[in-house]
Amino acid sequence: MVMPKTSYNDDEFNRLISPIVQNEEYQKTKFCTHHGLNRYDHMVRVAYYSYKITKTLHLNYKETTKGAILHDFFFNEEEDSRLKRLIDHPDLAYLNASKYFELTNLEEDII
């Protein structure tokens, strides 16, 4: 498995996210704008900080990282209003994540 190229020089983190970020559908998030970044970079950043905090606190960092890397796994829907997308995006992210990845109950809840 090829390790993803991220700006975070942490082998364990990169191994954890690798199966997800290499997914062909997930790669499409690189073309969606989100919080001033592309959605891919946003999710990697959120996942990294979630990983660091939960690992430091000796919590379930593996599932937290997976839930975080998938929390905005949806695509721009031009016909949707911004408010509708804000309300619906957790459900859209969950539907996409569950279509492509096996999720635990905790990961579903994080998404």
Image (cartoon, rainbow, N blue to C red):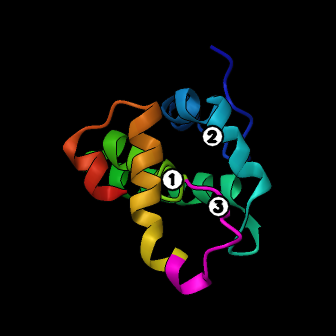
What amino acid is at disc 1? Ala
Q: Earlier in the sequence, mark 1 or mark 2?
A: 2
What amino acid is at disc 2? Tyr
Residue 7, how many percent across, how many down?
74, 47
Is residue 5 depicted above or below 71 in this figure?
above
Is 107 left, or right, of 97 in this rendering? left
Q: Which residue is mark 3?
A: 42
Question: Which residue is situated farthest in the left direction here?
Answer: 105
Question: Which residue is situated farthest in the right direction here?
Answer: 31
Q: Earlier in the sequence, mark 2 or mark 3?
A: 2
Numbered badge on residue 47: 1
| Image-quadrant location for residue 101 | top left
Q: Residues within 10 Å of mark 1 (few under 14, many from 20)?
A: many
Per the rendered image, the range of residues in magenta is: 74-84
Camera-side mark, 1 or 2: 2
Is residue 11 depicted above or below 36 in this figure?
above
Residue displayed at 70% across by 39% down: 27
Numbered badge on residue 36: none
Frontmost residue, 33 versus 54: 33
Frontmost residue, 84 versus 29: 84
What amino acid is at disc 3? His
Residue 109, how many percent across, how many down?
26, 56
- Can residue 105 be found in the magenta stretch? no
| Image-quadrant location for residue 32 | bottom right
Residue 25, how many percent across, how many down?
64, 36
Residue displayed at 54% across by 52% down: 73
Q: CA distance from mark 2 to mark 3?
A: 13 Å
Question: Dividing the image into 4 quarters, which one contains the C terminus?
Answer: bottom left
Q: Which residue is mark 2?
A: 26
Is residue 77 depicted above or below 51 in this figure?
below
